[in-house]
Amino acid sequence: MKKCNFTFYVNNASHHIGGLLDALCANAEVGAVTLVAAQAVPADRLALGWKAQCEGLYTLVQSPNADWVEEHVRQSCDDTVHVFIGMRHYEIMTKGIGACVRHGRRFGLFHEPRVREGVKGVLRYIQSWLTEGRIRRNGFVLAVGAHGPSWFLATGYKPAQVYPFCYFIKPGGEPQVLPPRDVLHIGYVGRLEQPKGILDVLEAARHITSNFRLAVVGNGELAPVVRAAAERDQRIVYAGALQSDQVQTHLQGVDLLIQPSRTTDDGWGVVVSEALLNGAAVITSDRVGASMCLEEAWRGRVVPAFAPKSIAAAVDAMVAEHVFTPELRVRRRAWALDHVAAEAGADYLLSVVRNFYENSARPKSFVEG
């Protein structure tokens, strides 16, 4: 079978996609893998532990001009697939997509749904209908999260073009097997802002009847509110911001992650994947893209947004149903390795490409099976 080459285009190099690219490089069906980044990694991301330089097996091209993008697409062989993680704002995206259309090259989007709420959501919907015709006519879409496929289908893409997708990440080392314990260790990891639902977590803590300890990791405008809550309630600990590698270590000791975003701006929620890969159970709101991983009760629960009492009830129900056993922790880790880890993502992406361009069988969604 002829090998596929891939070029990914992104605003800046992210560890959220580096694992997938490395897994593609290691796959026997893949040839060259290139990452084209519009700009360097921002300083605030570097402070969180992101890497300034490519440390993977793929080739990194940073800040190329429009002529380079045009020539790269033109010279690419017929079996190269160009994947755009974005379609606006950066010249490498707009010029690259145009070059793929002009030269008849294989290409697709790797894209989260756009935020639907409010008047701006309506305007985004109209903009998508008016400006994405060349993509609808030529490319495929790796639609991220629970709400990704419905967004693209609603804006004119055909079902045969749209595939569920996520940020497939590199798993860490084998997590520790935690012994049974009397205190449930709950974690929140993310920005401390109202849209992320941190206030719902703090309110839920007032209604949980099970014995628990809540550790909040992150920074943001509501950090003083979290700090004050921790001072009032000894069950709550504010850990501040952690670097990305420290988050992995932190999650190894968490029984339950809560991710209660109030907005669909959480197209996926990589920390959900990280938690599952460490064996933790998860509660998300129905706005979080990664909620699609929680259809089985032993993996977690999905609750309505803006519903702290529903969060508390879900926590107590999971305790009553003995979801936090060592055996289920191992099972969650195994499920995540098979469904949201980078190696599984590479295999799934190749099956998408074979289906779209070579009429092989359409793959089941990556969360199925």
Image (cartoon, rainbow, N blue to C red):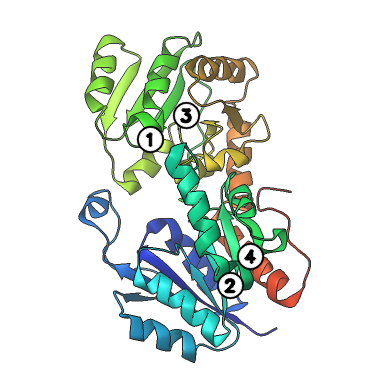
- The amino acid beneath tag 4 is Asp
What is the residue that sits farthest to the bottom in this orientation? 75
Q: Are marks 1 and 3 in contact (CB under 8 Å)?
A: no
Mark 4 and mark 3: span between their CA atoms? Answer: 29 Å
The residue wearing badge 4 is 347
The residue wearing badge 2 is 27
The residue wearing badge 3 is 258
Q: Secondary structure at mark 2?
A: loop
The residue wearing badge 1 is 189
Q: Are marks 2 and 1 in contact (CB under 8 Å)?
A: no
Relative horizontal placement of residue 334, taking residue 266 as reference (left or right): right
Badge 2 or badge 3: first in the primary sequence: 2
The percent coordinates of residue 321 (x first, y second) are 65, 19
- The amino acid beneath tag 1 is Val
Above or below, 323 against 165 in this view is above
Where residue 62 sits, quadrant-wise, is bottom left
Q: Is residue 112 visible?
A: no
Badge 4 or badge 2: first in the primary sequence: 2
Q: Is residue 138 visible?
A: yes
